[in-house]
Image (cartoon, grey):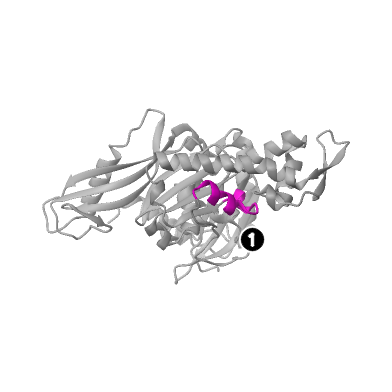
Amino acid sequence: MLNGSFVAGIDVGTTKICTIIGCPQSDGRLEIFGVGLTPSAGLKRGVIVDREDAIGAIRASVEAAQEQANVQIRQAFVGITGAHISSVNVTGRTNVSPGPAISEHDVQRAIQSARDGVPLPQDREIIHEVVREFTVDGEAGVSRPIGMSARRLDVELHAVTGTASIVENMERCAIDAGVGVVRRVLEPIATAQAVVTDAERDLGVILIDIGGGTSDIAVFLDGSIAHTSAIPIGGNHITRDISRLLRLSFDEAEKLKCRYGHALPDRIQENENVQVQLANGHQSEHVPLRLVAEIIEPRLEETFSLVRSNIKRAGLYEHASAGIVLSGGGAKLPETTVLASRVLDNLPVRVGSPRGITGMVDTVSSPVYATGVGLALLAAREGAGARPGRDGQQTLLGRVMQWWERILPRA
């Protein structure tokens, strides 16, 4: 472990902060060494509302993962989400420079041409971008054009934009918690890295990550990302419904939902009850579990209906041949897949669990960990690791190499 190159991902959610530390393996998998899952604070619907609380929560999650992995991380891939997120597919074009073949410089000019076509009001910025495909002299579907002979190079780019101040506040909180941000990654793209298969991406698949404050959406088609979005409804809305209708504290309602919640009332016996403590702190009463499910069901139906409308507006709903993959804490409620399929026109639905990992597999098997694992997998794929020394600190050689890479231009 001490000789490996470690990577980290931090999922900063509305209800929990999840830090994953792992070491890339020669077979392409990621061995998980540290997991830090702590309650979130200072966030609402993916947006920082109390800076000091958010910094403390991020720091607690990172420290828990570091202690378990026996390594100290200085940088990580950090997830970004929220209802302020939107996406667009744009194209760019450049004439290939005189020479024998397409160069890296030509590729970057084409990508910049696409970036220039992204509509950006003053308060927004591009926070994530993914190349969908290149077209070389009219021939589409090219993934690696460098070295090919051509006169014209086109690129289709999936660009994700967000409110600049919201994104900057999130990044600064991570930095003040002691972790440098190597890259900001849109959370549904990271989640998909962990739970969606290559075959599903090719066929067309919809990922729905039901978090605490928002539900993230990603649609993949022909092997690449085609649409991303977020709707401002998540698991906390279900908890709040239970809290208000049954006169419970939010914490008591959350416990009730997690322990006894169900997506389909007709699967619950009418005589099944559970005792709960009322918000006044002095009384308790028995609550029918079918009633709890009757509160949960319409909120989940609303969530999936909004997802359906969102994807239909993007013109991609009919292309999801592989169906739906659910992730996030909201996917843990029993029979959520059945309800989702019912709302989404009987498309096949499954719950995604992290793939491509070794080590603490059982610990991170829940869909709650999918985004954190996906962020770490992306960091491993892009070689964003740090080599620790015997005391868990990055070695002097590692720090010098990182400094050297920053000041020298890339080949």
Q: Give the x, y percent position of residue 87.
A: 39, 40
> In front: 366, or 128?
366
Q: Image quarter for residue 236?
A: top right
For label 1, the residue is 68
Label 1 SS: helix
Specify whether residue 344 is painted magenta: yes
Residue drawn at point x = 38 percent, y = 41 percent: 314
Q: Which is the main secondary structure of the residues drawn in magenta? A: helix
Q: Is residue 244 left or right of residue 86?
A: right
Identity of the residue furthest to the bottom in this view = 27
| Residue 14 visible from this viewpoint | no
Q: Give the x, y percent position of residue 56.
A: 64, 42
Q: Is residue 149 left or right of residue 69?
A: left
Residue drawn at point x = 82 percent, y = 37 percent: 278
> In front: 8, or 361?
361
| Residue 128 visible from this viewpoint | yes
Give the quadrant of the N terminus. Answer: bottom right
Specify whether residue 47 is painted magenta: no
Range shown magenta? 328-345
Q: Image quarter for residue 72?
A: bottom right
Q: Give the x, y percent position of residue 275.
A: 83, 46
Query: Quick check: 59 above or below 378?
Result: above
